[in-house]
Amino acid sequence: MEKPHTTDAYCAQTHEVKNQPPALENYNLFAEDKALQEAVQREGAGWAEQDIARFGAECGLTERIQLGFDANRQKPILHTHDRFGHRLDQIEFHPSYHQLMDIAITESLHASPWREPKKGAHVARAAKYYLHTQVEAAHGCPITMTFASLPALMHQKQLFDLYGGKITAPYYDPANIPAERKNGLTVGMAMTEKQGGSDVRSNTTKAYPIGEQGPAQAYELVGHKWFVSAPMCDLFLVLAQTSAGLSCFLVPRWRPDGSKNPVQIQQLKDKMGNVANASSECELRGALGWMVGEEGRGVRTIIEMVAMTRYDCMIGSSSGIRQASVQALHHCHYRSAFGNQLSAQPLMQNLLADLALESEAAMTLTLRMSRAFDNQDDEHEKLFARIATPIGKYWICKRAPNHAYEAMEVIGGMGVMETTIMPRLFRESPINAIWEGSGNVQCLDILRAIQKEPKVLDAYFAELSKAQGRDECLDAFINQLRRDFKQTPQQDWQYHARQFADRMALALQAALLLQYAPDFIASGFIAGRLTQRQQMNYGSLPRGINVAAIIKRATPAIS
């Protein structure tokens, strides 16, 4: 090859960049998600489609995507005191975090089903949250807790009348000032203690009545909390012991008289993921709190809140699975190797189709749960939600980490670069599986629901029966599951709880896909999940599946 005539020209350019995909940005996340569009219509939120599409376009903008990167570039910083020695308990965030919070609250992702209840309200909110958390997931923690706190507070009218309007308001105000001086409030929760973890009944934090005892009355709380996520919230739901047992309290960050409530942040947790969100350890040194619900019935009071946070974990993990799938599909659509487009090569097609099936199944179950929460006056929907929430939370959240890893591997070396979203998706992927009750806790909750109210199991099988007769493999799978419940002694249920939960989740996802998804999706899922009992790695789909159609359905088209 003849060299250039000058040294400068020879050194100026070493190569031309080829065979690299364009950045996945400036596209409409909703318009490029056919399965989500169908689910929004099917589950009762067609009236919101135009708004969801508008929001999906905003979520795909380059500047919106950049907010997620920026918010995670700097970990939150705790300032316990000001320069004069006054207690602050102030947390400093990257400005992008506040922008994401403002977007979420302005869009009413923290409260829309409570603020404007209507048919499909939970579905519409879930769809927008699903899109929003594909941009950045960590800031969703205070959004979810605020959303989930409202059912609990509605049971205590005096407190809801006092704060409910500001909690549901579409205003984000990050200022560290009393709630009385703000137009919008966020709510956190402080349940976990060092000695108990998920066993909140072992909590040692004490609550002492200031005057009269009972619901809505003022108490002073003394103790510690091992995990207080989003400690910059304005109000917190806290569990503490009274003479009657574990009770629930609403604790403000500031007292109504304008003085600092002694909820003191000891340190921020140094987490592997969920970086943009602050999680902390706190001590309550005589903190003011008002009792919510009956004294001694604290767990019962927050049970609806727990159901809502677990439901949001399903949304968040489904969202992460979708974003990981999209990144892998987009990469392979534009990348070639060994002379062929990656997405057209048989082995890669097997893997990509498997990742896409996981994503659609997760989203389909999640939005079916949204419909159940929209229809809690229906007995079947109420019973179904009770058992399907821990099933979905367990399964979808647990599937996310390996899915994120496989998508990262598809992208290859670039997939582990911090300049891409993949490392963040991977680090975020275990969070929802651990928070709000780990896998074992969800399995035990499934069993507890069945043993306490056997009708929930009937509701579960009634839901599966809607797909009965459409696929012999699924019918056989369901019949075997039903037999195993009947034939396994109840004293052995706990030992086999994960096996039951795995199969219940797979059967439910398969039944939903059979009813609502194209045949190539449902048959692919069943062939890949129900006929191979030993769960293999992703990319082990059997022959006979229309992988090309699955991949086309899930791949976003960008110019």
Image: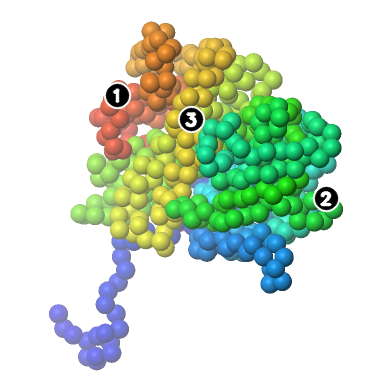
Query: Which mark is nearer the camera, 2 or 1?
Result: 2
Going by the image, does 463 lie left or right of 550? right
**SS class, disc 3:** helix
> Label 3 crowding class (10 Å Cα cut-off): few <14, some 14-19, many 20+?
some
- Mark 3 → mark 1, Cα distance in angstroms: 24 Å
> Label 2 crowding class (10 Å Cα cut-off): few <14, some 14-19, many 20+?
some
Residue highlighted by disc 1: 533
Asked whether the residues under the numbered discs 2 and 1 touch, taking CB atoms below 8 Å apart as contact, a structural biologist would say no
Res 220 quadrant in image: top right
Residue highlighted by disc 2: 256
- Mark 3 → mark 2, Cα distance in angstroms: 37 Å
Q: Amino acid at mark 1?
A: Arg
Quick one: 197 or 75, which is closer to the camera? 197
> Can you say whether 550 is above or below 530 in the image?
below
- Residue 220 appears in the figure: yes
> Label 1 crowding class (10 Å Cα cut-off): few <14, some 14-19, many 20+?
few
State the image coordinates of residue 470 (x, y, percent, origin top left). Answer: 41, 15
First in sequence, mark 3 or 1: give its number: 3
Q: Amino acid at mark 3?
A: Val
State the image coordinates of residue 486 (x, y, percent, origin top left). Answer: 42, 8
> Can you say whether 485 is above or below 355 in the image?
above
Q: Residue at x 53, y 61 (%)?
A: 75
Quick one: 199 or 39, which is closer to the camera? 199
Where does the N terminus fall, quadrant-wise? bottom left
First in sequence, mark 2 or 1: give its number: 2
**SS class, disc 2:** loop
First in sequence, mark 3 or 2: give its number: 2
Query: Which mark is nearer the camera, 3 or 1?
Result: 3
State the image coordinates of residue 284 (x, y, percent, origin top left). Answer: 67, 48
Residue highlighted by disc 3: 441
